[in-house]
Image (tube, rainbow, N blue to C red):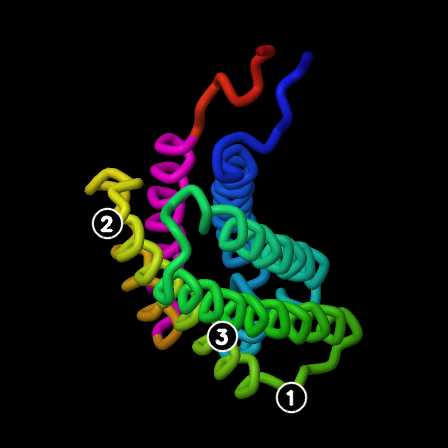
Amino acid sequence: MQRSFIGASGRPFGTVAALFCLLLTVALIVLGDVAHDLAGGAQPFSAIARGNLEPARDYWGLLLAVEIVRCVLAGALLLAMLTLAGPIGPRTIGRDAALLAGIAGVFCLVVTAHFSIEAAALLGQGRVSPRGDLVAALTLLGHAGVALWATLTVREARAARSLPAWVQLAGLLFAGLAIISGFSRPFLEFAAFAGILWWAGVFLTLYRPEDRTLR
C-alpha cells in the first residue's frame, strides 16, 4: 500500500513548496536579467524610471512574463509559509506572528505584481502606468513582511533545533537582503541569490526519500 503524501508534520508538502520557491527564484533571476538587457529594466516601473520607454514597449511581453513568474513565486511563498510551519517547530506565538507577517507580505507582493502586470500591458499600448509610487510602497511592505517571516522562522527553528546553523544563517542573510532590496533595487538580485541558498538549505534539510516509498 502506498504511503500517504503527508508524512510527519506535513514535511513532504513543505519540501515541495521549498523546491517550488527555489526553481521559481532561479527562473525569475534568469528572466529578470534577460528583461534588463532587452527592455532596459527587470520590471516595467524600473524601465520607465530609467527612461527606456522604447525598448520596454518593444519587449512588453517579456516584462509581462517576468511579473507573472513573480506572482506565481508569491503564491509558492505562501504555500511554503503554511506548510513549513509544522516541520520547523511547534506552534508558538512566534510561529503565528511569523505566519501573519509572511501572509501580509505576500499579499502586498501579489498586489504589486498585479499593478506591474497592468503596467506592462499599458506599455504594449504605448501608455505609462501612474502607479509607480504605490508599487514602490507595496514592494517595500512586501519585502518587510517576507523578511520578518524569515527572521521569526529562523528564531523558531533555532529554538526547536530543526534546521542546521548554516541554513539559519542563510535565512537571516535572505531576510536582511530582502528588506534592504525593498529600499534599494540593486540589492534585489543579491536577495534572490540568498533566497536560493535559503530554500536549498530548507529543502535539503527536510527532504526524506522514504516519504515517497512503499511501506
Q: Amino acid at mark 3?
A: Thr
Please state which of the two labelled residues, at mark 3 or mark 1, is closer to the viewer. Answer: 3
Query: Can you give x and y, in whole percent of width and height, for residue 75 in the image?
Result: 61, 56
Residue type marked 2: Arg
- Determine which residue is flagged by label 3: 139
Is label 2 or label 3 in front? 2
- Which disc, if any, is residue 130? 1
- Whichever of callouts 1 and 2 sits on the residue coming sooner in the sequence is 1
The residue at the point 59 percent across, 73 percent down is 112
Q: Amino acid at mark 1?
A: Pro
Give whichever of 101, 95 is nearer the camera: 95
Q: Position of residue 181 (x, y in %)?
A: 36, 68
- In front: 32, or 156? 156
Foreground tag (1 vs 2)? 2
Marks 3/1: CA–CA distance: 16 Å
The residue at the far right in this view is 125
Q: Secondary structure at mark 1?
A: loop
